[in-house]
């Protein structure tokens, strides 16, 4: 329905459509042209472009666009090799048992060996699995396609034989966002604005201003890149943002306005611009605040997964003393004035505006209104908007004002650099490695260790979930040496970094731990002194489960004879050597062996 609405809206508006690259479409066309037996499943979530790809594939093989637009959810086209291509535009349009026939045709093609038809089915992940389950129940069996497809969706397992699965939910990320931002902001129809009176002389049209900043001609695309950083962090945390949501994000950045009295539904049209210019409230159109849905009512913003994801970064709410000192005192403080001019006052549209400077003066001077309860609300709201602007506009690097410390992911940039190093097969930075090792040691032992060269696999002597563990079962180097120690790898299916801790040079004696951005942030903050339970109980439980796996593997290694031998000389009393972890004054941990003799 959404695809059909867009197609008809384009016809009414008489504008060119937004054209985005479709890398999977080329693969679909090649698969169809190759004559490969079986069928095609185009899967994804709502807004991933399933119907769009289905329609584009139909047209690429010579299908009639008018036939596609006609009523009916099943379209058929005879291929040059004699096969009948059966397009099922959207499985969700079938109610209940109506979906049985399309699914039976799919099963006949995939499992029944019917080469007379090739079914091209577009469906949501959960929907196709639910429909297959219900069909199986009606037939009194477990449908043979359901479990293989579930493994394909959830575990990136191989697709069933004779079924080519194209999962659109795995294609969106930083590159998609940057392409959408570039394509939307450089659309040919914007040329109609060139002669508009609303942007002549000294007038500022907020729509045109936001579009130009998103396009990035003045800052070499920095806004889109930093927006891409956030989208990439969200993706690596397991949050999928479909193309429809990324389009909504870019649209809101350009058209968003924080006052519904001047812009209906908080989205500007050209007719609203004269009123906004007359009011002198152009700063309420800041694309930097719009990127986080700050122009929208909270309930409306949270209806969109993309704005929920952006809000989770806390940009505008998180800050540093240096950033707030600059924004609050920079105009009047001689030590900060140069930075204020360079980073805030330079932007007369969304930075050091007259409204912001006036609110700043009122806040500092403590006028009567500012002293009343809630009297400083206006300035504090402006302060949040300025923090968001700084995240996008701060030069890189700027040691005095690090942008990542103005987000909930203070080590997000370090995480992305680690991932880039692994992809390029470069060495991981010693800073990142040291943080991970120190964080691991503190979680595994419950002690404030400073070691960055070795990892202690410790227990309390019995209970593996114990928070404090001083009995070292095994310690390994922080860098893989001779098949033993820690190394960083990339998970083949998810593309995330993972830790691989090997306790023995013999294959099969390693344990892996996948590093999401949240888990990395947890380890880094623990390494910097944060208490584990104060950051995330979920991350702590994940690390304790990892610790339990390490202890089991250490026990297996010991039993197999790869650890230190505890064999006693004949005729001597039995003894047991335990390694306890002690801490030096500098914070470094070391093992101290204690031998316990057992007299028989």
Image: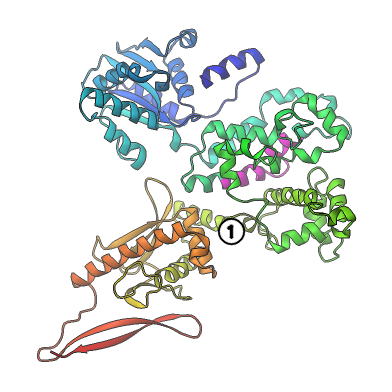
Q: Position of residue 519 (x, y in %)?
A: 47, 57
Q: How is the image coloured?
A: rainbow
38 versus 418 height, above or below:
above
Q: Nearer the viewer, residue 314 or 504?
A: 314
Please rate how many residues cluster around mark 1, counting C-alpha atoms within 10 Å: few if below 14, some from 14 to 19, many from 20: some
The residue where tag 1 is placed is 410
The picture quadrant where one finds residue 366 is bottom right
Task: Tell me if residue 357 comes above or below residue 600 in the rendering.
Answer: above
Q: Secondary structure at mark 1?
A: loop
Residue 353 visible to the viewer: no
Dominant secondary-structure state across the stretch colored magenta: helix
x and y percentages locating residue 439 in the rendered image: 47, 67
Q: Is residue 307 left or right of residue 462?
A: right
Where residue 419 sits in the image (x, y, percent)?
A: 48, 53
Residue farthest toward the left in the current orientation of the protein: 571
Q: Is 553 on the left or on the right of 187, as rendered?
A: left
Write the residue at 28% across / 82% down: 578
**Chain part drawn in magenta:** 208-230
In the rendered image, the vertical position of residue 184 relative to residue 156, given as above or below: above
Assign the C terminus to one quadrant of the image: bottom left
Q: How many numbered marks have been drawn onto this rendered protein structure?
A: 1
Q: Is 375 on the left-hand or right-hand side of 550? A: right
Can see residue 485?
yes
């Amino acid at each position: 329905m959404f695809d059909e609405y867009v197609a008809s809206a384009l016809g009414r508006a008489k504008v060119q459509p937004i054209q985005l690259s479709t890398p999977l479409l080329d693969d679909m066309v090649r698969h169809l042209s190759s004559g490969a037996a079986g069928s095609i499943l185009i899967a994804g979530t709502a807004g991933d472009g399933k119907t769009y790809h289905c329609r584009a594939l139909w047209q690429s093989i010579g299908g009639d666009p008018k036939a596609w637009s006609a009523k009916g959810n099943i379209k058929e086209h005879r291929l040059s090799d004699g096969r009948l291509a059966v397009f099922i535009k959207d499985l969700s349009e079938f109610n209940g048992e109506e979906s049985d026939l399309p699914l039976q045709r799919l099963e006949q093609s995939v499992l029944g060996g019917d080469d007379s038809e090739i079914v091209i089915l577009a469906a949501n992940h959960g929907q196709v699995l639910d429909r297959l389950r219900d069909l199986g129940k009606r037939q009194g069996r477990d449908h043979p396609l359901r479990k293989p497809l579930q493994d394909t969706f959830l575990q990136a397992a191989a697709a069933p034989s004779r079924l080519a699965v194209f999962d659109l939910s795995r294609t969106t990320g930083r590159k998609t966002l940057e392409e959408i931002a570039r394509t939307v902001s450089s659309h040919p129809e914007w040329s109609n604005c060139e002669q508009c009176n609303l942007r002549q002389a000294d007038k500022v049209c907020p729509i045109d201003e936001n579009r130009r900043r998103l396009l990035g001609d003045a800052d070499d695309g920095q806004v889109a890149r930093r927006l891409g950083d956030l989208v990439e962090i969200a993706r690596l945390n397991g949050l999928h943002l479909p193309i429809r949501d990324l389009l909504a994000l870019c649209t809101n950045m350009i058209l968003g306005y924080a006052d519904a009295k001047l812009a209906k539904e908080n989205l500007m049209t050209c007719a609203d611009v004269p009123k906004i210019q007359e009011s002198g409230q152009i700063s309420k159109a800041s694309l930097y605040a719009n990127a986080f849905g700050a122009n929208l009512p909270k309930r409306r913003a949270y209806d969109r997964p993309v704005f929920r994801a952006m809000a989770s970064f806390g940009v505008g709410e998180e800050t540093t003393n240096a950033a707030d000192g600059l924004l609050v005192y920079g105009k009047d403080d001689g030590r900060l004035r140069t930075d204020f001019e360079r980073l805030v006052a330079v932007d007369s549209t969304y930075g050091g505006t007259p409204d912001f400077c006036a609110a700043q003066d009122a806040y500092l001077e403590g006028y009567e209104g500012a002293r009343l309860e809630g009297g400083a609300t206006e300035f504090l709201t402006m302060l949040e908007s300025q923090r968001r602007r700084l995240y996008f506009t701060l030069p890189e690097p700027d040691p005095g004002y690090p942008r990542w410390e103005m987000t909930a992911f203070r080590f997000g940039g370090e995480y992305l650099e680690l991932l880039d190093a692994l992809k390029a097969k470069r060495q991981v930075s010693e800073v990142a490695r040291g943080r991970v090792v120190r964080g691991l040691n503190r979680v595994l032992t419950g002690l404030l260790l400073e070691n960055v060269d070795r990892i202690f696999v410790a227990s309390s002597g019995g209970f593996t979930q114990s928070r404090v563990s001083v009995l070292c079962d095994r310690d390994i180097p922080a860098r893989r040496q001779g098949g033993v120690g820690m190394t960083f790898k990339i998970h083949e299916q998810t593309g995330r970094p993972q830790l691989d801790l090997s306790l023995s040079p013999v294959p099969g004696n390693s344990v892996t731990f996948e590093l999401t951005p949240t888990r990395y942030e947890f380890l880094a903050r623990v390494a910097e002194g944060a208490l584990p339970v104060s950051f995330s109980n979920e991350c702590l439980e994940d690390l304790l489960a990892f610790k339990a796996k390490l202890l089991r593997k250490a026990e297996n290694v010991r039993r197999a004879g790869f650890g230190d031998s505890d064999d006693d000389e004949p005729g001597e009393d039995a003894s047991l050597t335990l390694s306890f972890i002690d801490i030096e004054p500098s914070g470094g941990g070391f093992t101290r062996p204690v031998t316990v003799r057992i007299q028989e």
